[in-house]
Each structure stands twice: as structure tokens, then as C-alpha cells.
Image (spheres, helix red, strand yellow):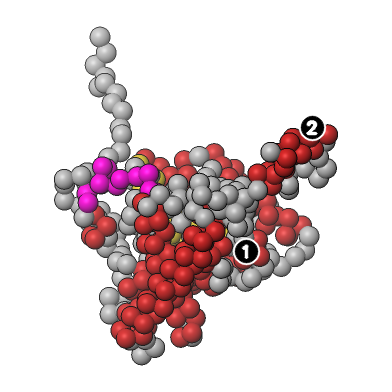
Amino acid sequence: MSNRAKLSLYVPEPNARPGQQPSFEHFNIPPAGAVRRPDISALEHEMRDLPFALIRVLDEQHSAVGPWNPKLPHDRLIAGLRAMMLTRAFDARLFRAHRQGKTSFYMKSSGEEAIGAAQSLALERGDMCFPTYRVLSWLMARGYPLTDLVNQIFSNARDPLQGRQLPILYSARDYGFYSLSGNVGSRFGHAVGWAMASAYSEDDKIALSYIGEGTTAEGDFHEALTFASVYHAPVILCVTNNQWAISTFSGIAGANETTFAAKAIAYGIPGLRVDGNDFLAVWSATEWAAERARTNRGATLIELFTYRAEGHSTSDDPTKYRPADEPATWPLGDPVERLKHHLITIGAWDEDRHVALAAELDSAVRAAVKEAESVGTIGKSKPPVAQMFEGVFKELDWRLIEQRREIEAS
């Protein structure tokens, strides 16, 4: 018999399950302004401390401090706040619409609104975002029509995608928003390929992509990083670490072993870890990475450290796998409230204006929903079925022509 100890399989477990006290004491949250900001010309091996830091700009007194402060004008900050508040108002009303049977599916962005809003406003109009389903604030920041969003969610006759996508899987090329996919990991590879094509054609546009931390365990993540590294692709690759991949906590994807930003080191590209609930920090890190990409210095991997405050989707009940009060204890706060209080601190905002804006945005969302409902909700209205033959083949063969004729005649 061997005297060796028996092997045991290690399975990561979250710090708290339902009924237990939530705790984030294991996180090292540095003070705002403590992380250095290297020059964009710095070499990757000179920045290997950054994936283990946490870039923060807004401090506990709601002031912007430190070298990553982007020093944005007031109108840019207010535009960001508006996009975040509009996203939250839209989410609340469309979630209710799902509960009323008006759509089959919905996903909220709650707690992550600063990410899409800041990056949408920081990048240029011709740049392309390869999104996940929790960056609706990207479209809100760029003024995408609310009624078009609702029509797509209702899959009605005025659905701008003509029923080709599930609810909330938006596509808006003119707004720099590539078609959403439920196969989230694929978007990293597509973004790298798009960026490589931009460089090959000597254009000046860059790409940005998102995946959740759970998707870093998939092959798409590593394949995309290899190509981004080898070909110095002008792309920003973002891992939204919101702590939960549906009901699986981030430790299953490796969060207990190292940071997700640290995965950049193996590929020789810079990795940044950013407070995803800090609008200014997200903006600044994105701006830094974009400048590197535009000056042919290649890709950057950004871990956006945040928290998914609501369920994964309308099909999910988060109280089954995490403490019900866990969202309230998240140490980095609420992104909307943090930007609001910063604007008040610098004298650019006040409570009365905030209340008025919230009412204005709620009214705009209600009007958009009412207009879309007049066309029809799911099952009450749908795009012409013959549309399924359009935009697929350059030329239809005789069989498809016959099938389309039969549908149009029925």
C-alpha cells in the first residue's frame, strides 16, 4: 500500500449562498487615484502590475482624483448620466412588459450601465462594438430610437430586424453596434477579425468587444487573444466580470486563482483592471487603450470589475444561488448614483434636475412602448413571413422562389 495522501478534487465555492451573510471582504479595493497611468508608448512588460491593480477615479467624497481622471467637460458627464438613467428606465418598463406577456424574454443591465455608456461616448462613431446583451447603454448613449428597440423586443411587424433575432439581440450598424449573439464568446474573434481588416485596409477605425468572465473559460477567448497579440490588432477586448455567469460564480472561471486582466500577460498585451461602476475610470481606461490601438501599438485586455445587480434574465431567479441582499452590499456602489453625486459635488447637477430628468426619460420610454404596442406585441403582430428569404442568398434558386410564392399566396 502507498503511503501517499489521497488526491482530492478542488471545486471552488462562492463566499455565500442563499441564507448566508454576503461578504466581499476577500476583495482588495484600493483607494481611488492610487494606480499609476503609464504612457501609451510603454512596453507591455513594463506594465505587468496593472492587471493586479484596480483603476478608480471617483473617491468616497465623489471627487475625481488621480492620474486616470479624464477631466471631462460637464456636458459629457451629463450625457453619460442620461444614457445610464435611460437604460435603467427602459429596463424597468420592458421587464414589466415581459411579466405582462408582451415579449418572450428580457435581460436587464442593472449595475453595469456605466460600461456601455462610457465606452460608447469615448469611442468614435466609425468604431465598431461587438456587444454582449448587457450593454444597452451603448445604444442609449448614441440616441438609437427607443421605439425601434421596443419593436425588436416585441418581434412585431415593425421589428427593424424583421424577426431574425431573439428579443434584445439588437443589431445597429449605423450606431457602431454589431449584431448581438447568444454565443457570446464568438464576438471576441469577430472583433479581432474586424480590427485586423481595418488595419489591412489602412483605415483608422478600431473595434471593441465584450464577453462575460464565464466565457473566458471557452476556446474563443484564447483564440481571439492569440490573433490580437500576433497581428497587433487595433482592438479593445473587455471582460465584464460581474461575478456571476448565470448561476455560476466567477471562481469557476478562475477568479480565485488570478484576475481576468492578468490573462493578458501570457499573450504579451497590456491588461487593465478597472472599476466598472466608475464612469470616469471606464472612460479613461478605454481612451488609453483606444489611443494605443490607433497608433499601431495593438490590443488591450480590460477587465471591467462590476456586479450584476439583477437576475441573469427573466428566466433566472438569483435568490436560488446567492444571498438576496448581496447586491446591496457590493462595495463599489451603484454606477448611476456615483456619477450623479459626482456631478452634484462639482456643481453641475442637483436633485431637482435629477428628478426632472428621470420623469422625462420615463415618459419617453412609456411613449415608445405605447407606440410599439399599437403595432402589436409578441404573438399579436409579426414581420411578413416572406422576409425569411431576404438577405440570405444573393440569388434565390428555383426551390426557394417556389416556397416564397407559396407563402405569399397563403
**Is residue 31 within the magenta segment?**
no
In which quarter of the view is residue 127 placed? bottom right
| Depth check, front residue: 21 or 82 | 82
The CA span between labels 1 and 2 is 36 Å
- Residue at the image position 51 percent from the left and 61 percent from the top: 374
**Is residue 314 within the magenta segment?**
yes
**What type of secondary structure mainly makes up the magenta span?**
loop
Mark 1 secondary-structure assignment: loop
Amino acid on which disc 1 is placed: Gly
Amino acid on which disc 2 is placed: Arg
Indicate left or right for 333 with 166 as reference.
left
- Residue stretch rendered in magenta on the structure: 313-324
- Residue at the image position 47 percent from the left and 64 percent from the top: 369
- Residue at the image position 36 percent from the left and 51 percent from the top: 99
How far from the left and from the top, in percent, is residue 143? 55, 72
* Residue farthest along the bottom direction in this orientation: 347
* Residue farthest along the top direction in this orientation: 1
Q: Which residue does the numbered mark 2 point to in the structure image?
A: 399
Q: Which residue does the numbered mark 1 point to in the structure image?
A: 176
How far from the left and from the top, in percent, is residue 147? 53, 65
Q: Quadrant of the N terminus?
A: top left
